[in-house]
Image: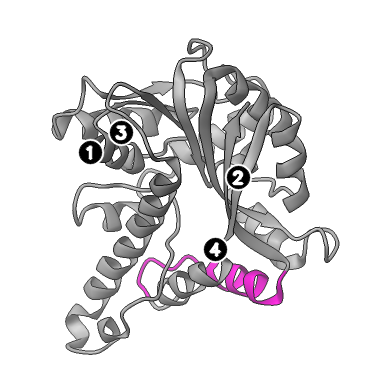
Amino acid sequence: MLRTDYQKAVATYWNTNQDDPVNLRLGEIDDLYHHHYGIGDYDASVLEGPAETRDERIIAEMHRLETAQADVLLDYLAPVAPSCRLLDAGSGRGGTSIMAHRRFGCRVDGVSISEYQVNFANEQSARQGHADSVRFHFANMLDTGLDSGSMRGIWTNETTMYVDLFELYGEFSRLLEYGGRYVCITGCYNDVTGGRSKAVSQIDEHYTCNIHPRSQYFKALTANNLVPINVVDLTELTIPYWELRAKSSVATGIEQPFLKAYREGSFHYLLIAADRI
C-alpha cells in the first residue's frame, strides 16, 4: 500500500503528528477536525477583550475560517443527491467528510495513508452516529481499490502536493462516473515567476511535501478526461487566516513563509472544479 520510501516518510510524518494543537484545539470546538487552512476576513474583535481569554477567541475564529473553507469546497461539489457516493482523497481527521454527509445526506468514503488519521476519523464518525454512511479506509489515493465509476464526486483538500498528479487524476478519472465532479483546493507555486521561491521551499520542507507548479494541475487534469469548469484564486482570502494564526498559541513558525510567498506572488491558493467527460 505504501509503495515508496517517500510515501512511508509521509505516512510516518502524519502518524507521529498526533498531538498537533493546530488541528486538535480547533476541532475540539465542535468535533469537526480538519487538516487544512481557512479563508475569509477574521473578526478583529477577537484580539480585544480580556487577555486571559484572547487565545481562546483566536482559536475559535481560526476554526470558523477553516470550516468556511470546507463549505466553499462543498459548494462547488454540489448538487449531490442522497443516493450519490463521494470520496475524500487524503481525508485527514475526517471533518470535511462529516460535513459533506450532513449537507448532502449521501455516503462518503475517505482514504488516507496514515493509520492514525483513519482510526481517529472513524472514531469521530461513530461517535457522531455516522458510522454507516461516513467511512474511512487505510488506502493509497493513487490506487484506492474502489470500484470504477462508483463516485459522483471526489475532492482533495491540500493533499495533492504529496503525489504525482498524472497518476492521481488517472485514478480519479477511473473512479468518477461520467459527468462526475472533482474539486481541488491546493497551494501551488507560480511558474510564471520561475521555480520554487525560498518561501515555497520552506513550506515543502516543513510538511515533507512537494508543491507542484500551477500549470501542472491543468496538464494532468486534461490528460485524464477531467475538464476544468471553475478556477478560483483564493490567495487573498487565505492571507487573513495566516495573519491570525501567527498571533495564536498554535503558531508553528511556518506562518511567515506562507505570508511571504502569498504576498510576493510566488505561491497561489487555488480552487479548481473539473468535470469527468
- Give the number of the disc on residue 44: none
Distance from the alpha carbon under mark 1 to that under mark 3: 15 Å
Which is more toward the observer, 210 or 155? 155
Which mark sits nearer the N-terminus, 3 or 2? 3
Identity, as a three-letter code, of the amino acid under mark 3:
Ala
263 with respect to 47 (left or right): right
Mark 4 vs mark 3, CA separation in Å: 27 Å
Position of residue 241 relative to residue 166, above or below, is below
SS state under label 3? helix
Q: Which residue is mark 1?
A: 102
Task: Specify few, some or many for label 2: CA neighbours under 10 Å numbering under 14, 14-19, or 20 or more.
Answer: few
The residue at the point 47 percent across, 39 percent down is 14
Image x and y of residue 130, in percent:
19, 28
- Residue 231: horizontal and vertical position, in percent? 61, 53
Badge nearest the viewer, 1 or 2: 2
Name the residue carrying label 3. 121
Could you say whether the residue bearing mark 2 is in a helix, strand or loop?
strand
Q: Amino acid at mark 1?
A: Arg
Q: Position of residue 243 (x, y in %)?
A: 47, 77
Task: Using the numbered discs, state the Cα–Cα distance from disc 4 to disc 1 in whole angstroms.
Answer: 25 Å
Count of labels shown? 4
Which sits in the foreground, 231 or 184? 231
Q: Secondary structure at mark 4?
A: loop
The stretch of residues the image draws in magenta is 248-265
Dot 4 or dot 1: first in sequence order is 1
Q: Which residue is mark 2?
A: 229
Provide the residue designation for mark 4. Answer: 234
For marks 1 and 3 on the same chain, the one whose residue lies earlier in the sequence = 1
Residue at the image position 81 percent from the left and 58 percent from the top:
191
Q: Nearer the viewer, residue 262 or 21?
A: 262
Q: Quadrant of the N terminus?
A: top right
